[in-house]
Image (tube, rainbow, N blue to C red):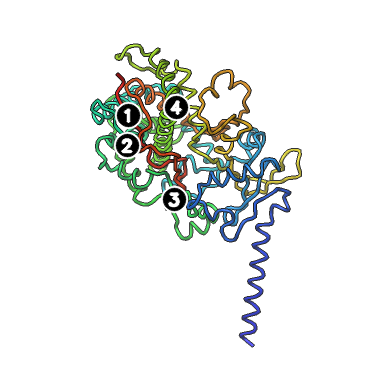
């Protein structure tokens, strides 16, 4: 009798589980939203991080569902999610109705002090910290950083001169630019002087190469933490490995402790944050808060600078005419070798903006943007409802490669971003740094640094396709950002 009762209970449990799973995956029928059916327990994420990047999943959904509805439903494990396929809806979510979609819903854990960074914060805490940090990225503050940024670009050029020794040489640009970025971002955001460009054994470079070199992980583990946050906290899952957390907290503490208030202030984030901490109105940051924000700015800058510069040099090496047009405009502004760059002079090269923007269009650093619906949301002029708690994915890569928005989107064409062609574009057709109140606060800094580096390099070197140059590019499937495998180019001195 006991065996029969036990078997009956097992059958009931299985039937209930089957019913429950079907209810989870049937949510889109109730919401009148077309969807891609998921498979328990992965939802639609089974191949993400192994066979495909998350941007490839959202790109496929976008292409298949765009003509059917403004959003397409799918599942991240057992959590409901949508890919937005209509630019007007994108604008509502990111801008006009952004108060209903301000949260990213990213997992945080007190066991992981670096997880409490600005990117991960939600709700009132995000607004408070955003308002506190935003002034640090004003045009005035960025101008103060210009000279040190130019010095780093000079060091990069010196490294190229020493390495190629006057002859065309194949170089792994991805690796060199990653070491360069470690130096730039380490000094700018961590207050740590190092020379990773010439010494790969520095601790900052070792940590960056081990954990950040190919981008932070965004596979099933990442989505499990975000989907089952309470479970993840109970089993003490962390986003950042302990070695990384300990290193960055220790580094920031050392920078704070070694500040010399009797000497002129250095123009780095730690110095600026400490200056803010003396302002009673703004409130003081704890060591962990300071470390978390310094860490995320370092990581975001490191990833964006490394990958965007590598992609840009790769593209203008494939199309030499574009490289020569850009170089001519640069040399028109800097007529003599001794001419020093300034904040104003690098902004007098319109084609430079076009080249950078086209690189960011074709290779957006953040190929997918994440938001969470904080309440039920009915899409205007439809009977479709996005339920509260749904994860929203804005498929930036898909939008940037949509042939109805950009003619021949796979072609690299900086003229898309000249003044005439920019007049009629949709506000959300180009989003390399997102848009709306949760747009990247470091976008001005990123653009300045991309310009400084490209101007410095193109005044002195020519880049071209070499025997080791990859065709086509292969993307890291697990990276949080759009990151390619090694990019080799031939570099030679300008005659």
Q: Is residue 181 visible?
A: no
Mark 1: secondary structure: strand
From mark 1 to mark 3, how far is it between C-alphas? 38 Å
Disc 4 target residue: 319
Q: Nearer the viewer, mark 1 or mark 3?
A: 1
Looking at the image, tell me whether mark 4 or mark 1 is earlier in sequence order. 4
Mark 3: secondary structure: loop
Mark 4: secondary structure: loop
From mark 4 to mark 1, how far is it between C-alphas? 15 Å
Looking at the image, tell me whether mark 3 or mark 4 is earlier in sequence order. 3
Disc 3 target residue: 239
Q: Could you tell me how many numbered marks the image carries?
A: 4
Q: In this orientation, which residue lies closer to the viewer: 362 or 120?
A: 362
From mark 2 to mark 3, how far is it between C-alphas? 24 Å
Q: Is residue 158 above or below residue 379?
A: above
Q: Would residue 72 be found to the left or right of residue 312 on screen?
A: right
Asked if the residue at tag 1 contacts the one at tag 4, i.e. Cβ–Cβ closer than 8 Å, the answer is no
Looking at the image, tell me whether mark 2 or mark 1 is earlier in sequence order. 2
Residue 441: which numbered mark, if any? none
Residue 179: which numbered mark, if any? 2
Q: In this orientation, which residue lies closer to the viewer: 348 or 282?
A: 348
Looking at the image, tell me whether mark 2 or mark 4 is earlier in sequence order. 2
Q: Nearer the viewer, mark 2 or mark 1?
A: 1
Looking at the image, tell me whether mark 1 or mark 3 is earlier in sequence order. 3
Q: Would residue 495 be found to the left or right of residue 386 on screen?
A: left
Residue 138: where, in percent of width, then height?
46, 25
From mark 2 to mark 1, how far is it between C-alphas? 17 Å
Q: Is residue 57 above or below residue 151?
A: below
């Amino acid at each position: 009798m006991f065996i029969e009762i036990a078997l009956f209970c097992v059958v009931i449990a299985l039937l209930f589980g089957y019913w429950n799973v079907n209810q989870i995956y049937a949510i889109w029928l109730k919401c009148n939203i077309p969807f891609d059916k998921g498979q328990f327990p992965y939802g639609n994420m089974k191949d993400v991080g192994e066979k495909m990047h998350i941007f490839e999943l959202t790109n496929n959904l976008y292409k298949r569902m765009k003509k059917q509805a403004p959003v397409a439903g799918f599942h991240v494990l057992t959590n409901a999610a949508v890919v937005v396929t209509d630019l007007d809806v994108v604008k509502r979510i990111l801008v006009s109705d952004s108060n209903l979609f301000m949260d990213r819903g990213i997992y945080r854990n007190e066991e992981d002090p670096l997880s409490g960074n600005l990117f991960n914060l939600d709700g009132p805490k995000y607004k408070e910290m955003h308002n506190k940090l935003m002034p640090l990225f004003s045009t005035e503050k960025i101008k103060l950083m210009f000279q040190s940024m130019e010095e780093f670009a000079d060091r990069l050029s010196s490294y190229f001169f020493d390495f190629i020794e006057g002859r065309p040489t194949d170089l792994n640009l991805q690796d060199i630019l990653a070491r360069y970025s470690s130096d730039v971002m380490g000094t700018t955001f961590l207050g740590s002087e190092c020379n990773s460009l010439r010494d790969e054994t520095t601790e900052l470079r070792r940590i960056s190469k081990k954990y950040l070199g190919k981008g932070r992980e965004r596979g099933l583990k990442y989505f499990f933490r975000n989907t089952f946050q309470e479970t993840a906290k109970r089993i003490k899952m962390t986003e950042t490995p302990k070695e990384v957390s300990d290193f960055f907290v220790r580094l920031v503490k050392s920078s704070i402790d070694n500040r010399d208030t009797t000497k002129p202030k250095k123009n780095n984030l730690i110095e600026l944050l400490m200056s803010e901490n003396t302002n009673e109105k703004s409130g003081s940051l704890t060591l962990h808060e300071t470390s978390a924000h310094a860490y995320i700015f370092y990581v975001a800058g490191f990833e964006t600078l490394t990958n965007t510069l590598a992609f840009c040099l790769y593209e203008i090496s494939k199309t030499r005419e574009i490289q020569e047009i850009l170089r001519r405009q640069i040399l028109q502004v800097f007529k003599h070798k001794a001419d020093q760059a300034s904040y104003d002079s690098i902004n007098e090269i319109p084609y430079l903006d076009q080249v950078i923007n086209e690189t960011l269009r074709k290779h957006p650093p953040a190929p997918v943007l994440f938001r969470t619906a904080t309440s039920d949301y009915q899409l205007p002029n439809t009977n479709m409802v996005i339920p509260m708690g749904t994860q929203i994915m804005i498929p930036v890569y898909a939008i940037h490669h949509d042939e109805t928005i950009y003619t021949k989107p796979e072609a690299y064409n900086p003229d898309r971003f000249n003044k005439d062609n920019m007049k009629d574009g949709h506000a959300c057709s180009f989003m390399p740094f997102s848009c709306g109140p949760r747009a990247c606060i470091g976008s001005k800094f990123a653009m300045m640094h991309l310009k400084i580096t490209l101007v410095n390099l193109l005044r002195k070197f020519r880049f071209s396709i070499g025997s080791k140059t990859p065709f086509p590019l292969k993307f890291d499937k697990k990276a949080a950002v759009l990151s390619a495998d090694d990019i080799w180019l031939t570099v030679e001195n300008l005659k």
